[in-house]
Amino acid sequence: MKNTHISIALLVTMLVSTFNLIFAQTEDEIPGKGLDRIVAVVGNELILESDIELLYHSQEEVALQSVSKEQAKCIILEDHLFQKLLISQAKVDSVEVSADQIDDELDRRMRFFVSQVGSEKELEAYYGKSIAEMKGEFRERIENQLLVQKMRAKTTENVTITPAEVKAYFDGIPQDSLPYINSEIEIAQIVKMPPISEEEKQRVKDKLEGLRKRIVNGESFGDLAYMYSEDPGSAKKDGELGAVDRGALVPEFEAVAFNLKGDEVSELIETEFGYHIMQLIERIGNRVNVRHILVIPKVSSADLTNARIMLDSLQQSLLTDTLTFDEIAEKFSDDVATKLNGGKLLNPQTGSTKFEPTEIEPMLLFTIDKLKVGQVSEPVLMRTADGKQAYRLVKVTKRTDPHRASLKLDYQKIQAAALEEKKSHAITRWIAKKQGDTYIKIDPAFKGCTFTNSWSGI
């Protein structure tokens, strides 16, 4: 519920490359440009010189570190050629994306931009456009991007790879060119969440009921939210969450938010975060802005101690081999996300069970630093994703030292790389095949380009 705030001065540095590609500029805003001109045609799709210039100048600092200015523009042009060929073929094949898909992607991107700026009003003020106008100007680009994604996936949907092909790919890499793989660790856990006592729940309810009564009797919701709400992201904004789309809030909270009227103050709401009361600020269609006060029930020290004692006894069971770690995780762990897969943690960045040390939270890394493979820690205090205290046992199930890539140790990484190469070859064949059926014309000014694929039409 917390927004990241940045100054408008920093906004230019952070978002200019993205928005320059979203919102049309006049041609005299492009460095070195006068009237725009067509530099390539693919089917009925046009590539303008401004398309190349805008992307080049938004990435100029990075591009010039690795290739010349001319080759950087050639790379950009080839990417545009491929995208336009995908879009052209999508129209031939009657491949479409739905209006709902486009709307969802527009909403997702606008939420991101708003979160970076701080509010919709600041974003609208900076660009001098309403959110609706921005979406309207962005819509065709989003539709084309979704079409490109859909068609690209279609061109490689039947590409698979066998273990023999993975081995052949690996064997084809010179030994001195094998990538260096950082140390990786696989971790499993058994979590015990102390229960919240009924007395504590009642204390929180009574506190919120008292605050609600004060608001109904005339005190400012915002002032009380600032003083008493335990949501750090919204408390300093008088409890205001900012306008959000339907589906962006947890169900129990959202159901009440979209049913409030006027300046009505809600009854108490229980969610996974704690207990809330809220007040409507504004609702427009499927967007709502509310302010709320959150109070989080606290775990008693006695219940926290009981959780640690229980994990102590489970650890003893492991030491005496009466139960396996996997069995204990499934039967006793309170972490729904890991209990059914042996307690194994998933890396949110990669979706795999492997973590590099830099991807592990500091306290957990400190816990596992001296554990041997197969060793289980003592019960250690942790905080869950929603900020609650708990205890857990942690086990290192696998650890590798930094090394050159190995088929035995790094099969999944090598398999992924081999599959990507095979997909790249499939795309090259697809481009070659479709060029014969598609009108392509490229400005002679680009005849000196070294393209990855052999494009006709120059």
Image (cartoon, rainbow, N blue to C red):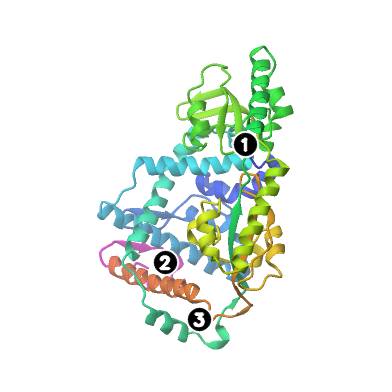
Residue 85 visible (yes or no): no
Per the image, the residue denoted by label 3 is 408
Extent of the magenta region? 436-458
Q: x and y percent of residue 410 in the render?
A: 52, 76
Q: Can you tell which quarter of the image residue 447 is in?
A: bottom left
Name the residue type under label 1. Tyr
The image quadrant where one finds the C terminus is bottom left
Q: In this view, does 180 lie to the left or right of 257?
A: right
Q: Give the tally of numbered discs.
A: 3
Q: Which residue is drawn at 57% across and 78% down?
A: 179
Vertical arrangement, residue 106 with respect to residue 198, above or below: below
Name the residue type under label 2. Pro
Per the image, the residue denoted by label 2 is 444
Label 1 or label 2, whichever lies nearer to me, is 1
Question: Is residue 448 magenta-colored?
Answer: yes
Per the image, the residue denoted by label 1 is 126
